[in-house]
Amino acid sequence: MADSNYWQRWSQSRLTRRRFLAGAATLGAGALAYTMVGCRESRPSGTPAAQETPAGPTRGGVVRAVLLGGNVFDSVDVHRAFGDPTSWLSNYVLNKIVRYKNPDTGEIEGDLAERFEIIDGANYVFHIRRDVYWQDTPITGGRQLTAEDIRWHIERQKAGRLSDGSQASFRHQSFYQQVVRVETPDQFTVRVTLQNPRGTFLDRLANYFSTVPNREATERFEKNHTVITEEAMPATGAFILRRWRSGEEIRFERNPKYFRQGRPYVDGWIYPTGLFEDPNAWRIAFEQKQVDTFYSSDPNLPKSIIDSRPGQMYEVLTGVGNTVFMHLNMNQQFKDVRLVKALHMAFDRRAAIQAFHQGLGQVSGPVPWLQEGFAIPPGDLANLDGYRTNRDEDIRNARQLWQAAGGPALGEINIKVPDTWLAVWPDTVQIIPNMLNQALGVNQFRSTRTSYNEEIIPNLFNGQFPNWFGWTSQVTGPDPRETLFSVFHPSGSQNFQKVNNPELTRLLEAAIAETDYRRAVDLVRQIQRILIDNGQYGNVVLYNYILRTAVWNYFRGALKQPPRPGEPALGYNIFAGHLTADEMWLNSNDPTFQGRANVSL
Amino acid sequence: MTAYIIRRLLMNLVVLWVVVSVVFVTTNMLPGDFALRQVATNLELQDYSQAVQEARRILGLDKPLWQRYGEFIGGLVTLDLGHSYETRRSTWAELGDRLPSTLELGAMILFFTFLISIPVGIISAIRQNTWLDFILRGFAIFNVATPAFVIAVLLTLVVLKLDLFRIDVVGRPHFWTDPEAALKLYIIPGLAGGLTSGAGIMRLLRSQMLEVMRNDYVRTAFAKGLREGTVWLRHALKNAMLPVLTVMGFSIAGIVSGQIILENMFNIDGVGRFLYTRLILRDLPPFQGTVVIIAFVVVTVNLLVDIAYAWLDPRIRYAD
């Protein structure tokens, strides 16, 4: 009876294992043959040469690109999101009241406001466009955007309250608390009155985190704002969020009701998830035109890819917004300002750029060079303490200060390095102490690992933070005044070093109120000289490095300077998502477009 | 035999409980949590602590450890492996999405493991100390000594340089949706993983074959005038395969847990990559839940291998 069952017979068969071996051999031979022959794709032979792009941008195509800032979204509410990704994403979908025409210089133009008037430093009038409509969803009904939307946007953040009156955490509440009144004399005019003149008010409104969300959708999802869904962010901007889920790819689709005629050029964007966590996967995707751009923390890698395909790709150089700096605790170990001045001069910025970034970077004064308008010009900076190209004078002065201020008596000094930095440059724990020990002629410095989230940030406000070297907050806008005020004014929210210099305070107050650009720049440069004279008060700005991106010729983004023969293109250093959203296009006439992965939404 | 199996099953439950508890405690001792990741590194925050506290309250991370442990164990009893902090989906749903990719890659690795290790191991033993044996042993040692990801990088560079075929690392194809694209995606990590794991098995099989070949019954088989191939395959290989089976059993169990590095390198959304990203994000419920599943698979496969031993070798009998 048992023998009549096929599966029992099969299981008892002595041939089972041999059958398996024979089968494995056959399958293996087949698979290997397929690898050798079948996988080769029919491609046109020869490589197309790079050619000039046609006169104007063409429309169409879907871009697959890198997901900046990761994809861990903490909220759908742009007012309440504490992580950057939501703000970043909103720049493709929403608009701001005003925006940067050039994010590096800070030139501002209208966005939702078609024009604006600066009555004085404390009074502003915005004339809202009449052709802006919300994406047509069951929540918005596709209604027109009016001055009331702007009023709600400002007053909600100022009050820090939800629609039911309950208090909640709003990331930029302190900024909006300077607003005394928001009036809407008619449906398309907004008048804003501030407590005091604030020369940086428009700059903050133009920043990437100042997008204006839809009131009805925001309030609908107020209670569940941490559940990520595209319904919560109806668009006014270039793209509609077609798909937005945590941990999954993000899809944008062209907004047919976008008020800027002819924009955007591309039909949509896809941000695949995970691809960029491993350089191998990203490299494969880029070289095979599944994505259009590639960069790496090792600048040699994109360079080698560009060089391996002459005439098919170009190089884009972009300053990295996360300034590299050294934070020395003046509340504890470095109470004498001469000590931090000594370290400010002992640190060899150019050597660090060479060691960590193969020379792709530029030294930064207290205002990073990315903020072109306000930074001290490189030629002038090179004559100041700590920035001289000839290091002898800096080292000599640093040693004198160190000795005079009793530096050797401090004993062992640990300059900690955050783990996120060490993951990319693990030898930093040797390089930094060696550099400082050699420059000062001592053997006091060492470096160990730390963490932003566990040791640095939680201890900033209580003054117990360690001395550390790494990235500081990202440069988010072209105007440094708010940051300088916040870090060095006695009432500043980030004055962790408890700086109180009357002359500096006076200049900071004058600068923050100044609405005239030239005078503001002049004041900021005076402030920087005081900071350099005082070793930057322990906030030792070092440099900003440069990211090298490899880009296929057919991909045309918003560039400050397009590629020229023998010269790389220059990208904008400061993030302005609206420029990418509006200006990016794909040149399907370029020979390199051939073979690009066909992507549809 | 039945009593033995029951005893092993009970012991497996204890092992699982220990694994689960150790994983729960150690992962909760790791510095940082998901709330810190969410609130992110932003020195501009004025109310950082408040934001972190609020995030912890929403996620339930403000509860004491013992309470969370109790909830976790209680969940396991009802087969609830928890929900992802990031996506809010259940661990089962997340795993269900990833398991197919892991099995596809695992099948590919197993395929190459068997394809390479068994024939090479047999030939190397039969042709002991010949030039062919030296070459095959050199090949095996190279693959044992070279990590799979290095082999994968080398193979990838060859494919890119020669423009052989498109590796669809963005589209994440499956064999049932686009077999050709899936084969092109999985073949390099499959071959790299297969070479590495197959090399060890090849060396083990070779040594087992050499040992078996010296036994009397093999000499007797030859003396009877049996054909060489028959002796190797029917008499020698069967007995040489017993220890190899154990190693293969663990290889299969390892496949379920995913190939963390290979999956990352080729953006394969499998269990290994899932584990890695959950740990980096401190998204602990799905991490812990997945470890429970892997532990279950490993102890179960271990039991099955032991049972298979008895089936394959009549000399082995487990005491009741």
Image (spheres, rainbow, N blue to C red):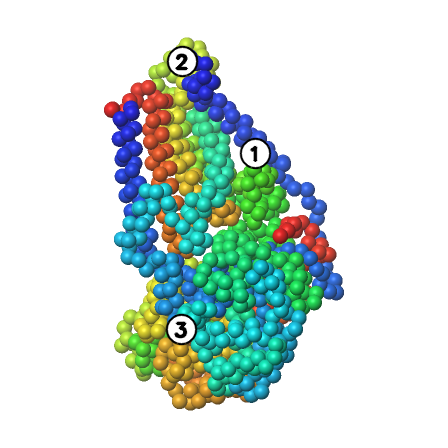
Residue type indicated by callout 1: Leu
The answer to whether residue A274 is above or below residue A473 is above
Give me the residue at 54% from left, 62% from top.
A233
Q: Quadrant of residue A238?
A: bottom right
Image spot of residue A483 (x, y percent): 46, 77
**At 42% from the left edge and 48% from the top edge, which residue is drawn?**
B90
Write down the residue under mark 2. B221
The answer to whether any part of residue A362 appears in the image is no
Task: Give the distance between the C-alpha atoms of the residues marked 1 and 3, in whole angstroms.
Answer: 60 Å
Tell me, yes or no, if residue A265 can be seen here: yes
Q: Secondary structure at mark 2?
A: helix
- Mark number, residue A32: 1
- Mark 3 surroundings within 10 Å by alpha-carbon count, few (fewer than 14), some (14 through 19), many (20 or more): some
**CA separation in Å, label 1 and label 2:** 35 Å
Residue A424, percent across and down? Answer: 44, 60
**As drawn, is B228 to the left or to the right of A145?**
left
Whether residue A316 sits left or right of residue B246 in the image: it is: right
Location of residue B165 in the rendering, given as x and y in whole percent from the top left corner: 61, 43
Amino acid type shown at disc 2:
Ala
The circle on residue B46 is: 3
Foreground mark, 3 or 2?
3
Tag 3's secondary structure? loop
Are the residues tagged 3 and 2 within 8 Å (C-beta)?
no
Q: Disc 2: which chain?
A: B
Q: Residues within 10 Å of mark 1 (few under 14, many from 20)?
A: some
Residue type pointed to by label 3:
Gln
Q: Is residue A596 above or below residue B164?
A: below
Give the answer, above or below, for where A455 lies relative to B112: below
